[in-house]
Image: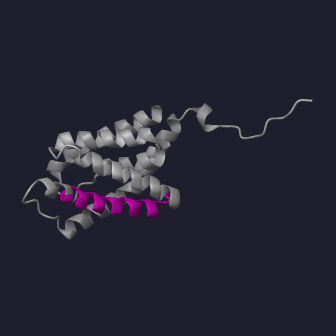
Amino acid sequence: MKPAIALALAGITALILRGALAGAIPQGFHPDLVLVVVVALGLLQPGATGLLIAAGLGCMADVLTGALLGQHALLFVVAFAITRLAGAQLDLRRAAPTAFLVAALSVAYGLGSVALSRLFADGVAWPAAGRLASQAAIDGLLAPLVLPFLSRVVQALTDDDRRAVPLAPRRREA
């Protein structure tokens, strides 16, 4: 339970930093730390707990940004699911595949956000390709720095009893 709480707090901190950086850095050049935390959830917190934290972070992002209620929640849940699927098929312990995954998710997140907004509101413009590319590059470069840190935090908070599971067969007594 401690790792889940730590990742949830990391996500909330990322939301706060996202809001703080939004006014100081031009749009398209500020990192999306929340997406990186959602990828960390997909890699480090499997199951319903990680999914619920990703959805909760999305709901908080919806409320803080004034977006359609459920928009960011849906996109974070999809990002979590894609990360879980990619983690089962690819070796995401290295920096390059992880950076590529986060960059691809960043582009998909930007396009998905605009697509969902266009369903319910007129006049929402598609983002420029350069802005999507710069956002993806920043997020991709940031991921290999943040994910190992979160992995170490989760590993430090994991109970020793849960980590060391003996797999030796039982001995029969004669």
Q: Position of residue 7 (x, y in %)?
A: 40, 39
What segment is highlighted magenta in the picture? 92-115
Q: Position of residue 135 (x, y in %)?
A: 26, 61
Type of colouring? one colour
Residue 20 falls in which quadrant of the image? Answer: top left
Residue that appears at 43% across and 59% down? 98
As drawn, which residue projects farthest toward the front? 119
As drawn, which residue projects farthest toward the bottom? 129
Q: Position of residue 60 (x, y in %)?
A: 24, 39
SS majority, magenta:
helix
Residue 83 visible in this rendered orientation of the protein: yes
Q: Is residue 173 left or right of residue 39?
A: right
Residue that appears at 36% across and 48% down? 38
Residue 113 falls in which quadrant of the image? Answer: bottom left
Residue placed most toward the observer, 3 or 167: 167
Q: Position of residue 114 (x, y in %)?
A: 18, 58
Residue 33 visible in this rendered orientation of the protein: no
Residue 150 falls in which quadrant of the image? Answer: top left
Q: Is the residue 141 above or below the residue 43 in the image? A: below
Q: Quadrant of the C terminus?
A: top right
Q: Is residue 110 magenta?
A: yes
Q: Is residue 150 magenta?
A: no
As drawn, which residue projects farthest toward the left? 123
Residue placed most toward the observer, 86 or 36: 86
Residue that appears at 37% across and 58% down? 102
As drawn, which residue projects farthest toward the top? 174
Q: Is residue 7 left or right of residue 62?
A: right
Q: Is residue 63 left or right of residue 173?
A: left
Residue that appears at 13% across and 53% down? 120
